[in-house]
Image (cartoon, rainbow, N blue to C red):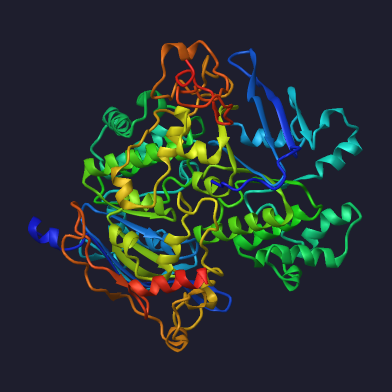
Amino acid sequence: MSPAAESRIPLLQVQDLAIEATGDAGPVRLVDGVSFEVHQDEVFALVGESGSGKSLTVLAIMDLLPPGVRVSAGRILFRGRDLTKLPERDLRRIRGKDLAMVFQDPMSALNPLQRVGRQLAEAVKLHATGLNRKQTAEKVHRLLAAVGVPDPAGRAAAYPHQWSGGMRQRAMIAMAMAHDPALLIADEPTTALDVTVQAQVMDVLAAARSRAGSAMILITHDLGLVAEAADRVAVMYSGKVVETAGVRDLFHRPAHPYTVGLLASVLGEGTAGGRAFTIPGSPPAAADRPAGCAFAPRCHASLDQGTCTTTAPLLELLPTPPAGAHGPGHPAGPRAAACHFAGDNAGQLLLKGQQA
Amino acid sequence: MRTDTPAAPFLDVLTVQDLAVEFPVRGPLFSRTTLKAVNGVSLHVAPGETLGLVGESGCGKSTLVRAILGLNKPSSGAVAVGGRNLAGLLNGRRRQERARIQMVFQDPYSSLDPRLTVHEIIAEPLRINGQYTAAAVTALLEQVGLTAAMGQRKPGEFSGGQRQRVGIARALALKPELLILDEPVSALDVSVQAQVINLLQDLQAELGLAYLFIAHDLSVVRQISHRVAVMYMGRIVETGPAADVFTNPQHPYTKALMSAAPVADPDKAASRQRVVLTGDLPDAANLPSGCAFRTRCPQAEASCAAVVPSLLPPVPTQVDFPVVSAHQSACLLVHP
């Protein structure tokens, strides 16, 4: 493929992805028709609460779904090749090289019985067989130095428990960046860390990514992190993408009532001392989602109960904001929302319902 | 940050005076040193008031709480409940006084017995104290927004937010005056966090409860606290009314904490100045001399290694009236 053609095709295309778990009462759809694209060089955030299916979606991309959970429909195209159809042997050539992942908890992702340097060396050698011992060690030290680990040679000889949480997450980032992946997947990379360490690790992640020119999928429930790091965002609710937009559009003109509610329940300067906004109720379990829109029982915008409780809304394109509405940097791309009443009014209805 | 005044700010529910908790640890070779997990902490909470205690993991928050609850023996200092020093009381009497303080834990999944019904979980403290009636349990369930019928289910059938409500109902059973809330919403989803915070504010208004609210999430602390104390390596480095600490932080550590917290606004996020600290927390068994924060402080000077700074009110400027401010910080750069 020529470089020009390559830049037009998205790096990753997830199309109508469905993920099922085998339950006692038949299969349960945990992820239900998710589609999105990730382009070269961008940070794409997947946002949602626990159980929304965001982690399963990226585990499916890495082919790391837990036992009993499988992709039941849809395609995952990476550089135009469908990962769901690829034999394990070919997949292994991509995973850890072009596709890499940083997990939430660096302690459980590292082997406690092996020195950190040896674990990094393993990741290095997996896709660079020509290196001898000395060259491998040098590469490991270079990788650790690049993520800001002081005294890389000394730290590489230590065991994971001798590393602090922030330093362990740096080691995980170094490991993921070992082969300059085209796409880096970071699943809640800083949730286990303290605030001041979180800021350090996010900076390290951004620097490593821009050095290697990698695109990133950032999975998080923290809307603050999304605002700081992402170019585009998809919001997931109960196994579906309910809204996708450029980061500025999402925060300034949210179109789905759930997004509006999520943003309104963020605590901050404005809400301090008063009552916090809340979305009533809690998300449904995957096994008993209501018919129609899964968010309808919690939604004030579902005035037309008939439509919302009978027909599941599709993710549909919204009118694009006027040119010049965005600052410099990445183009905002299209906005889409899955709501019968999507648009700037739907959200306001939700907020009004709360105040009344 | 709250501007309303607590209901009755007279006699403090909880007073902690110059508290220190030390643990013996093995040093290099055969040497022995002491780890000062809590090092001269003083704080007080008035009825109807929320004191937010902020600090990162390893700063001594949990040891402080355990010492207040009598689970760690302090090496010096005192804990007084309702003005009465607990150390001077006989065991039975001390237990009675301690019942005035109850605890809500971080993880609503592991802090509730999975084999008991929710009704039994809430009934347990009542039974132990001979106060059990089924009606009392129902009243507690309703107080936290659950129904009597829900009491017949087990914790596994509840969502995270509902479980935290059960934890709060259990803590309220013996009609305490103070709740210690240890990261009560950090395990919950964003939309559920706000529900629990609102419930806590309602209960405080209704029952005149005092809260010692421990969290690392500054936006949550800001939402619920009247006053704030910031802890670093066993010491309180800044304390004061929430409005003052959040709008005018004095200590470099407080400033760094606030600037590190992400802001949910892409435009503000792009433009704001951040103080990113270098390095990790120091080893608690081998603290730096002088100010413990100097190894990570972007403004540290040579003198910071020599003196341990004490908590002092801000230096008055000429236009200020000579009033004693409750906003104090422990930094040599603020108080040369």
Q: Residue at x 48, y 83 (%)?
A: A291
Q: Nearer the viewer, residue A325 or A50?
A: A325
Which of the 4 quarters of the picture holds residue A301? bottom left
Measuring from the top left, give residue A187's x and y in whole percent.
41, 52
Question: In the image, is B201 to the left or to the right of B247?
Answer: right
Q: Is residue B187 left or right of residue A154?
A: right
| Relative height, residue B187 to residue B15 (above, below) | below
Residue at x 55%, y 68% (from the top left corner): A282
Q: How many marks?
A: 0
The answer to whether one can see residue B163 in this image is: yes
Location of residue A232 with respect to B153 vertically, above or below: above
From the viewer's side, name the closer residue of B91 and B224. Answer: B224
Image position, residue A261 (x, y; %): 45, 65
Q: Position of residue B246 (x, y in %)?
A: 48, 39
Q: Is residue B33 above or below residue B180?
A: above
Rendered position, A29 above or below A116 = below
| Residue depicted at 39% across the width and 55% down the height | A219
Residue A115 visible, this orientation? no
Judged left or right of residue A44, residue B44 is right
Q: Foreground: A87 or A23?
A: A23
Picture quadrant where residue A60 is located? bottom left
Q: Residue at x 64, y 55 (%)?
A: B200
Image-based side of A279 in relation to A86, left or right:
right
Which quadrant of the structure image shows residue B142? bottom right
